[in-house]
Image: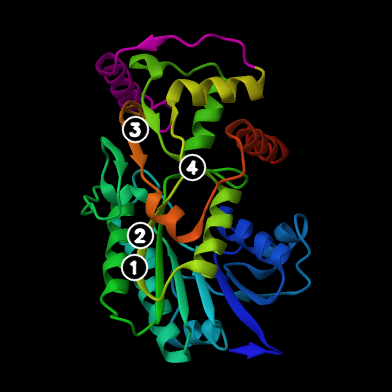
Amino acid sequence: MTSGGLKKILVTGGSGMIGSAVLSKLLERKGSLLKTQVRDRLAARAKLGKAMDITMVEFEQADFTRVGAQEMQALTKDCDTVIHCAGLVHNEGAAYQEYEVVNVRATQLLAEACMATGVRTLIFLSTSAVYGKGPFKNIEESTPPQAKTPYAVSKVTSENYLQSLNGRIPRVVVLRPSLVFGEGDRGNMLSLIKQIQKEEYVHVSGGVTPKSLIYCQDLADAILLAEAKAPAGFNIYNVANPSPVSTKELVDTIAEVLGVTKKFASVPEGLLKIGAGIAKTFMPGKAPVTPEQIEKLATETTCSIDKFVQTTGFTPRTALKKGIANEVEWARSGELI
């Protein structure tokens, strides 16, 4: 497992938003041999090489949509710890079968490889979406999952599988982050930033709904704390900034960073859903907002992280404005906004 006393850590999805942040933090921490799984080795090396010194990172190319057992075992060989960040993220309209291939089948193959090659710790990135669409307030890990979307169902399916292993991997840590944003984000936060930049956004029922968020670099810190401090056995932890923000506070922060001075109007949720439904029907793929996105904005989804804080002492270090500014800078550099 070690070379010269150093642990070897595998990070899957190393070129993604979370995986790349984890690699960067591990390189800063030093003291470990690092390996990462990526879909395209050359592209990943070029991308990550602009942001960090990758000379000491071993890159392994593997496509989790078609990976086999032997390829997985080659990935986990000689590793003490596996941090599993790779996965198909939430994509509206995607069928469950797409999520099942990557988020369930590949995770099961990875866990089997961990058992076969003697990996001691597996950290699995799940999602707070397993609790359902909400509303939920300061929800705790003991609350039974109510997964509704194909993405959330795929994650809770893998959680259940990992729990069923009953110690065959000595330490399994499941992390359920709230909405993740930052450099590399191509999901809900980036969509919101685009709407605000184009001045197409409207508040849903006053914008008072609280949300739990976490900046990607803070999540990476949380993952390293879990690796260092989580106990043996199977454990699940929520991970989020302990201070939820209202959608109005979030929108105001984004507008300030973008330099947008418009004061956004507030529209009742029901009326906005009707308009969005019409736009979705007659402007498929081009509507500025969907009924599903409106429902998310209008629904409280906040998580308690007391269990994780008690275990690890986690305290996020990044202010909301700084995290948003970093995402905006990244998006502008890639001409995404």
Could you say which disc has been placed on residue 55 in the image?
none
User: Which residue is found at the position 23% from the left and 53% from the top?
Assistant: 145
From where the camera sits, is residue 23 visible? Answer: yes
> What separation in Å lies between label 3 and label 2 (alpha carbons)?
21 Å
Which residue in the structure is indicated by mark 4?
241
> What separation in Å lies between label 2 and label 1 (alpha carbons)?
7 Å
281 inside magenta stretch: yes
Q: Quarter-wise, where is residue 105 in the image?
A: bottom left
Sequence-wise, which precedes: disc 2 or disc 4? 2
Q: Are marks 4 and 1 in contact (CB under 8 Å)?
A: no
Which residue in the structure is indicated by mark 1?
104
Q: Are marks 2 and 1 in contact (CB under 8 Å)?
A: yes
Sequence-wise, which precedes: disc 3 or disc 4? 4
Q: Are marks 1 and 3 in contact (CB under 8 Å)?
A: no
Q: Position of residue 261 (x, y in %)?
A: 61, 11
Q: Amino acid at mark 2?
A: Tyr
Q: Position of residue 36 (x, y in %)?
A: 61, 72
Could you say which disc has been placed on residue 99 in the image?
2
Which residue in the structure is indicated by mark 3?
296
Residue 310 as seen in the image, left or right of residue 26: left
Camera-side mark, 3 or 2 = 3
Q: How many marks?
A: 4
Q: Which element type, helix, strand or loop, lies under badge 1?
A: helix
Camera-side mark, 1 or 3 = 3
Q: Position of residue 291 (x, y in %)?
A: 31, 28
The region drawn magenta spans 260-289
Sequence-wise, which precedes: disc 2 or disc 1? 2
